Image (spheres, rainbow, N blue to C red):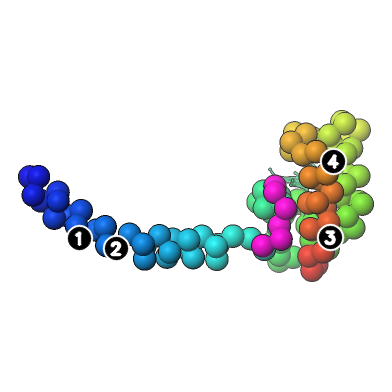
Amino acid sequence: MRNIRLLICSLIYPLMPPLAVAAALAMSSMAPAADAPPGASSCSGCHPASAGVATPVPRLNGRDAAQITTAMTEFRTGKRPATVMDRIAKGFSDDETKAIAAYFAALKE
Ligand code: HEC
C-alpha cells in the first residue's frame, strides 16, 4: 500500500509545476479586463455588457460616470427606491463607487 502511494506521488510531483502554470494561465485569461477596479465584475452579473441581452436591468457600459455615482449615492442613502441596489450600494465607499463608475463610463456602449 505504502509503495503504491509512493509510486503515485513520484509520478504526480514532477507534473506539478506545469500544472500550476497552466492553471494560472487559465485563470488570467478568464479574468475580466485587467483595469477593472474591485467590485466592478460583480455589477456585470446583473447589468449586461452586451446590448443584445434582453433584461430590465439597464446597461452600465458607456454611461456617464457622474450619473452612475449619483445613482449609487441615492441608492445608498435611500433617496432612490430600489429592490436590490440599495443593499449593493451600501457595500462600496465613495472612492470605490467612483472607480467603478469611471470604469463603466470608459467601456464602449
Ligand atoms: C443582483 C443584481 C444587481 C447587481 C449585482 C448590481 N445591480 Fe445595479 N441594478 C439592479 C437593479 C434590479 C436595478 C434597478 C433598481 C433596483 O430595483 O434596485 C439596478 C439599477 C442600477 C443603477 C441605476 C440605473 C438607472 O438607469 O436607473 C445603477 C447606476 C446601478 N444599478 C449600478 C450598479 C453597480 C455600479 C453595480 C456593481 C457595484 C451594480 N449596479 C450591481 C441590479 C443589480
Q: Residue drawn 27% across and 62% down?
A: 14
**Are there few (<14), some (14-19), or many (20+) residues within 10 Å of tag 1?**
few
Q: Are the residues at dot 1 and dot 2 in contact (C-beta closer than 8 Å)? A: yes
Q: Is residue 108 left or right of residue 13?
A: right
* Amino acid at circle 3: Ala
Hey, what amino acid is under mark 4?
Asp
Q: Secondary structure at mark 3?
A: helix
Element type at marker 4? helix
Residue projecting furthest to the bottom: 108
Mark 1 vs 3, N-terminal side = 1
The span from disc 2 to disc 4 (Cα, nearest Å) is: 46 Å
Residue 19 locus on image (x, y percent): 36, 62
Whole-number angstrom distance, CA of label 1 to CA of label 3: 51 Å
User: In the rendered structure, which disc, 4 or 1, sits on the residue that comes first in sequence?
Assistant: 1
Nearer-N-terminus badge (2/4):
2
Q: Nearer the viewer, mark 4 or mark 1?
A: 1
Residues shaded magenta: 34-39
Name the mark on residue 15. Answer: 2
